[in-house]
Amino acid sequence: MPHSRKSKNKKETEDTTKDEKSNDNETGDDEHNEGPKQDPDPATKVSASDAEKKDTERKIALQTYVPRPDSTSDLPPISMNVIINPLWWILCILSFVTRLWRLSEPNQVVFDEVHFGKFISYYMHGIFFFDVHPPLGKQLLSLMAWITNYEGFFPFQTIGEEYDPKLVAHTYLRLLPAVLGSVVPLMVYRIVTELGCSHYSAFLASLFLIFDNASVTQCRFILLDSILIFFIVLTVLCYVVFSSEKRHFSQVWYQKLCLTGVALGCVLSVKFVGVFVVFLVGLHTLHDLWVLLGQPKMSDYDVIKHFGARVFGLIFIPIVVFMTCFFIDFKLLYRSGPHDAFMSRDFQKSLEGSRILTHPEELPQAGVEHQIAFGSHVTLKRVDGEACWLHSHPHNYPVFYDNGRGSSAQQQITCYGYSDMNNWWAIQRPGTENATLDNPPIPVKDKDFVHLVHRMTGRRLNSHNVAAPLTPTNQEVSGYIHYENVSVLQDLWQVQFLKHSKGSNGWTSTSTTVQFVHVNSSQALKTTDLRLPEWGFYQWEVTTNTQSPKQGSQWIVEEIQFGINPKNNTETNERSGVPVSMWFFSKFREMLLTMLVKNRELTEEHTFSSRPLEWPLCQRSIAYWISNTSMAQIQLLGNPLLWWTSSVGVVTYFGLLGFYLIRRRRQVYDIEMTVWTQFKDAGWLLVGGWLLHYVPFFTMDRALFLHHYLPAVVFQIVLIAIVIDHVYHYVIPQRVRLRHLYLIFIGLVVLAILWSFYYFSPFSYGLKSLTPEGVAARRWLSTWDFLVRRPDGQIGMLI
C-alpha cells in the first residue's frame, strides 16, 4: 500500500529528537507524496529490508555526531543577550537633563549653602563643628570637595555671595546631590514594577517625579535633602527586592537583606527623620514574621533563623553603619572649632588646639573661689529650696495662657534642675556690646549695675509690667532682643550682696550670695515653687517681686569662666596643649544627646516656616535666592497641579480601599485575590511611607519648612500612578470606548502637569528674570511668598 511506509516512518520518528524529525521529512518528501504514485523503475528499486537497514544506520549516525570545532553550531566564547527598555532610557535622559542642566547657575550662594558650604570647609581643615544632623550627608559632600581639590577657603558668608572660581568649583559641590536626585526616579521605576504593576504605571510614576519642581530645585544645590531622599528610596527598593526573594537563606537572600540594612543605616546617618523609614521597614518586617509564624509547614528552627537574620540585617547592621559614620567624623574633625562650647569639658580636651588646653585658666571652675568681673561667664544657682539654675532656651511664652491671659510672647526664663549649656550667662558691663573681659579686668562690686546675657541665644534678661505665667501678682521675666543704640532699663539689674566672705573686695564664686534687683521696678529676681506646664517643660517659674521676703531670690555663682584668680590661689595649670583621648562611646553618647536636645530647641519662627496642614496642597513656598541685579529668583515650590492631583490620588486610594473592604465583608469579591493582595500590599507600603513621613510633624514644636515634606511627596506621587493603573484595569468597565476616554483624560492630566512644570520652571532654576506682572501671574495662592524688587532696588514680598 502507498501509505504503509509513511506510517511506519512517522511512528519511528516520534521516538527521536526534533532534528531527527526534520531530517526525516527532508529525506522523505519525494518518497512520501500523498498523491497517486507510479511504480518505480526496476533498476532503482531496493528491497524493504535494505531501506530499513539504511534508515537505522542514518539514525545512529545522527545520535553519535559530534560537530567539528569550527562548526557554525558552536556558541561563541562570550555571549550576551541585551534587553533594551526604551521607557527606562527615556526616563534616564529626562531625569539627568532636568537636574543637571546649567547646574553652575546661579553663580551665587543659595539658601542653606551658607551652612553646608561652611561645614565642607571645616572638613577640609579638620575643624570640629556642631550640627543637629548626623554626619553622613556632610561627609559625602566633603568627599566630593576633596576629590575636586577644594581647599576650604571660600567663606560662605551670606546668601547671594558671588562664588570665586579661584577658591571653589561650586558646580562640582552641587554635582553629588544632583546626580543622586537624578537616580531617584529610576529607582522608583523598579519599585513600581516589583510591586507587580505594569511598566506603563512605573513610567508614569517616574515621569511625575521627574517633573516635580520642588524635587528638581532641592537637588540642584549643596543641601542634604536629595541625599536623604536617595537613601530613603534606596531603602524601600532594597526591601521590596528582598521581600520578593523566595530562596530563603540563600546567598542572594542574605545579600539583599544586608543591603537593606546598610541602606537603613545610611538614611539614618543623613538626618534623624530617616528614622521614619526605619519604622516603615520595621512594621513590614514584623508583618512578614507574623505571616511566617502562621505557616504550619515551617519548623520552629526556620522561624528562629528568620527572626535572627532580620535582627542581624535590619538592626545590627544599621547601628554599625550609624556609629561608623560618627567614628569617621571624630577622626576627621580633630581640631578645635567655633562650636566647642556646645560640648563638655572632656570633649573639648580631646580636640587639638582647644583653648581649654592652651589656656586652662579659662576653664569653667566649680568649687574654687574666683572673683567675678565684667565679661565673666557664670551659672547662677538658687540658694534655698530644691537645687536649680537660672535657665533660658529658644522657646517663647505662649501668646495666651490657658486662662486667657496674655503674655509678652518673648523668650522663656526658667529655673532648671540639671546642669546644661543653657544655664550659662555673661555678666555684661552697661554701655558695652561685648561680653568679654576688659583689659585689665574690672571686678563686679556690690551695688554695681549689670546686664545678664544668655550665652546660647544672646538674649538679655528682662522684666516688665506683664503678669508672670503662674503668679499674676509678680512680673514676668523674659529674654529680650537687645537693639543697639536703644537705652532701656528693663534689662538692667543691680547686684546686691547678701552674704559675703571676709577679706574679699568683690563678688566671688562659691561664697557670695547675691540678689538681682530690677532697676526699672525695684523688684528682685526670684523663683517660685510652681512648675510651668508642658510648654515650659515643667521647669520652675522665674519672676520678679518685692525684695522681702528673700525666699527664692538668693543666688550664688556655682561655675565661672573667665574669672579673676585670687592672689592667694597657688593652684597652677600646666599648658601642655596635648589633646586628651576620650573613649569613642562617651563621645558618641554626648554628641547624640546634644544633637537631639538642640533639635528640639529649633522653635524660633522663621519668615518662611510653615505647618504640616499647608503642605499636601502646596500652600507655602520658600524663597531660596534672588538676583542682586534682576527679578530672577529661586523658590522651593512644588508642581501645584501634580501635588493637588497626587493628594486626590491618596483620597481615591482610601476610597477604593474602604469600598473593597465593605464589599468583601458582604462576601462580594469584585477583584481576584491576587489583584486584591497587590493593591493592598502596594498601599501598605506607599500609604504607610506617606503617613510615617508626614503625620509625626504634627507633634513637633520646632520650626518646620516645606522641604520637610519632600520625602512624603515621593510616596504620594508613586501612589497616584498605581491608583491610575488600578482604575484602568479593574474599575472601569471592560468597554473600549470608556477606556479610551479614560486614557485621553489621563493624557490631558499628564500634559497639564508638564505644562505646570514649565510654567513655574523660572522659580526652579532662577535663570529667567520675570517682570513683576509675571511673578504676580504665577502667584496662584496668596500664601506663596514670592519676592519682588521695588523701584528703589529694595527686595520685598509680593503683596
Image (tube, rainbow, N blue to C red):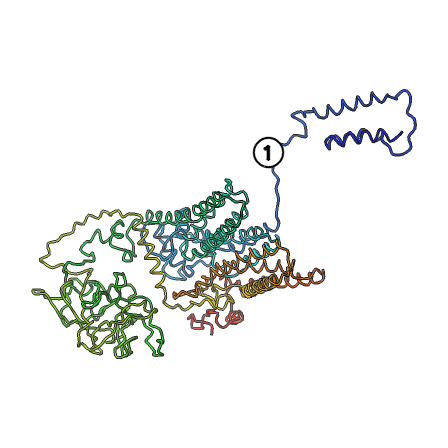
- Residue that lies at the very extreme toward the left in this rendered image: 503
Which quadrant does the N terminus fall into? top right
Front residue (pair 434, 561): 561
Res. 355 visible in picture: yes
Res. 149 visible in picture: no
Residue 164 coordinates in the image, percent (x, y): 40, 55
The reply, left or right, for residue 513 in relation to residue 746 is left
| Count of numbered tags | 1
**Residue at the spot x=53%, y=62% of the render?**
761
Q: Residues within 10 Å of mark 1 (few under 14, many from 20)?
A: few
The reply, left or right, for residue 237 in relation to residue 335 is right
Residue 404 coordinates in the image, percent (x, y): 36, 79
State which quadrant residue 14 falls in: top right
Front residue (pair 633, 61): 61
Front residue (pair 253, 623): 253
State which quadrant residue 114 falls in: bottom left
The reply, left or right, for residue 696 in relation to residue 671 is left
Residue 98 coordinates in the image, percent (x, y): 53, 56
The three-letter amino acid code for the residue at tag 1 is Ile
Where 66 falls versus 200 (above or below)?
Answer: above
The reply, left or right, for residue 517 in relation to residue 730 is left
Residue 296 coordinates in the image, percent (x, y): 53, 47
Where 279 falls versus 249 (above or below)?
Answer: below
**Callout 1: SS:** loop
Q: Which residue is mark 1?
A: 78
**Residue at the spot x=41%, y=53% of the render?**
270
